[in-house]
């Protein structure tokens, strides 16, 4: 039976996952790489660290495989932007990560221009926020000496992490991305399906710097044997949240998933309709297959698992993320302690880059268990805020939520999420849905799956969490805590 390889270039680690044609995980390799915080609100990655860790994972899995994979799919942290030399492939600066807030002032100036903001919304489905790629790319062009002149001279290439990896794996032969990643840049017209010349000019980004936009399942060249150890065809690319939506088999309009990782990302398939949001959500490309675009509504939560990492790495109150479940369960309630983890501002539905992390309700009796529980509760509350907005935009209540990501191994969190939402929360048999989606897209282009429905038939449920109790009172207090975190940074 054919196998499919997925490369998952995440925010804190990279992975390579080998799947069987039935969606079963055959092999996994994973490596973390360093995070850089050079100034408050700044988040950077070393592009070479991303490449080295992803290459090592890919080589490890390919070397152990009995046969070369039928195809390779790439999925990646979105919005993170890089610029590199077309001749050497060497980065000209650190990658600016999606969490980075350094362009908050620039985005606020854009937001004050109602006509420009409306243009952005109409063409891209997005909002002027530092989360997206365009202002990050413009910052690199304007603040790294010589980069703008070299970009205008055609010496440099730019792109999101998928584009950088494609360039490296193909020896510089392919400078491309897919429609889902392009749709996260503020530069791509999601209706016409191409880079928008006017937006590029307004943001000061030379179009020649940008990659070709292709279908999410298609020909992306070949990862060379000299690089990977074996030659493997690259046949799928998608941003991580779109890949997870595909991997969860949310292929029909109205189906929704939430990925609980570093951040939390809720995506609802809206079919061939690019539905506008009146609730602070994003209209985005889910994927493009055979030139036909499927759209989605998305709510992005910037800090989810990262709050648990903060408890572990900065506060030292847990040794492992898994400890938080037992600590949360050790309490009968939260004793009115709430954590709003707005470390890099708040995403949907608030879009407040000036919000900052806040803990309210502390007393002398507050323990590390309260903080652990507050961090987990915050993930569920933020997700509920987004899903409530999504239901309002769609005019239909949520019926069930499919979940994935590293945090969903935490049964306490899954049950609490079901209680807060008051709908079933469903965990799949294969929780590696981001990687699975990338592999499935590659499998479509390689002929392993004749159509998306054939892949959907491989999806299996592992556990269903039914609501047990109401959390409406706690959620009302959560909203009060959020109000106290809003607009804290006045710098």
Image (cartoon, helix red, strand yellow):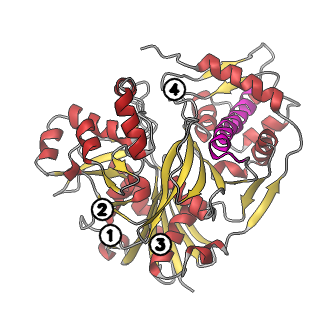
Magenta-drawn stretch contains 463:
no
Magenta-drawn stretch contains 377:
yes
The residue that label 3 is drawn on is 442
Neighbourhood count class around disc 1 (C-alpha, 10 Å): few under 14, some 14–19, many 20 upward: some
What numbered label is drawn on residue 367?
none
Q: Which residues are the magenta region?
A: 370-396
- N-term mark: 1 or 4: 1
- Pick whichever, 89 or 404, lies toward us: 404
Q: Secondary structure at mark 3?
A: helix
The Cα–Cα distance between marks 2 and 3, rounded to whole angstroms, is 18 Å
- N-term mark: 2 or 4: 2
Neighbourhood count class around disc 2 (C-alpha, 10 Å): few under 14, some 14–19, many 20 upward: many
The residue that label 1 is drawn on is 227
Q: Position of residue 204 (x, y in %)?
A: 23, 38
The Cα–Cα distance between marks 2 and 1, rounded to whole angstroms, is 8 Å
- N-term mark: 3 or 4: 4
Q: Secondary structure at mark 2?
A: helix
Instruction: State the residue at coordinates (34%, 26%).
Output: 106
Q: Secondary structure at mark 1?
A: helix
The Cα–Cα distance between marks 1 and 3, rounded to whole angstroms, is 19 Å
């Amino acid at each position: 039976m054919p196998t499919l390889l997925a490369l998952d270039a995440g925010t804190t680690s990279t992975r390579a996952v080998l799947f069987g044609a039935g969606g079963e995980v055959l092999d996994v390799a994973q490596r973390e790489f360093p995070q850089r915080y050079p100034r408050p609100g700044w988040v950077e990655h070393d592009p070479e660290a991303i490449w080295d860790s992803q290459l090592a994972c890919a080589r490890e899995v390919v070397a152990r495989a009995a046969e070369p994979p039928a195809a390779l799919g790439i999925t990646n942290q979105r919005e993170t932007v890089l610029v590199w030399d077309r001749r050497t492939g060497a980065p000209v600066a650190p990658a600016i990560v999606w969490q980075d807030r350094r362009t908050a002032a620039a985005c606020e100036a854009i937001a004050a221009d109602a006509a420009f903001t409306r243009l952005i919304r109409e063409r891209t489905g997005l909002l002027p926020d530092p989360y997206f790629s365009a202002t990050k790319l413009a910052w690199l062009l304007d603040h790294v000496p010589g980069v703008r002149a070299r970009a205008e001279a055609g010496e440099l290439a730019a792109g999101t992490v998928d584009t950088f990896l494609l360039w490296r794996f193909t020896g510089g032969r392919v400078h491309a991305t897919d429609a889902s990643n392009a749709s996260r840049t503020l530069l791509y017209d999601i209706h016409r399906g191409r880079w928008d010349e006017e937006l590029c000019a307004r943001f000061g980004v030379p179009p020649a710097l940008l990659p070709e936009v292709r279908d999410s399942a298609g020909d992306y060249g070949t990862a060379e044997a000299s690089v990977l150890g074996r030659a493997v065809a690259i046949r799928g690319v998608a941003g991580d949240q779109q890949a997870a939506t595909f991997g969860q088999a949310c292929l029909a309009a109205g189906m929704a998933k939430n990925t609980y990782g570093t951040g939390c990302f809720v995506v609802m398939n809206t079919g061939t309709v690019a539905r506008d949001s009146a609730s602070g959500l994003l209209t985005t490309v889910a994927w493009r297959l055979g030139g036909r675009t499927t759209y989605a509504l998305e709510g992005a939560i910037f800090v989810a698992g990262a709050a648990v990492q903060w408890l572990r790495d900065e506060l030292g109150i847990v040794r492992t993320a898994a400890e938080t479940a037992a600590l949360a369960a050790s309490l009968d309630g939260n004793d009115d302690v709430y954590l709003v983890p707005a470390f890099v501002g708040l995403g949907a539905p608030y879009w407040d880059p000036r919000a900052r992390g806040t803990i309210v309700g502390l007393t002398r009796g507050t323990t590390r268990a309260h903080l652990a529980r507050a961090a987990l509760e915050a993930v569920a509350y933020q997700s509920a805020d987004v899903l409530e907005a999504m239901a309002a935009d769609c005019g239909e209540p949520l019926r069930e939520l499919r979940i994935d990501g590293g945090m969903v191994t935490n049964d306490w969190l899954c049950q609490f999420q079901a209680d807060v939402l008051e709908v079933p929360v469903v965990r799949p048999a294969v929780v590696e849905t981001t990687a699975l989606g990338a592999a499935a897209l590659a499998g479509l282009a390689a002929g392993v799956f004749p159509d998306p429905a054939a892949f959907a038939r491989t999806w299996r449920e592992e556990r269903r969490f039914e609501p047990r109790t109401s959390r409406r009172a706690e959620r009302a207090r959560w909203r009060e805590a959020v109000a106290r975190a809003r607009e804290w940074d006045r710098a």
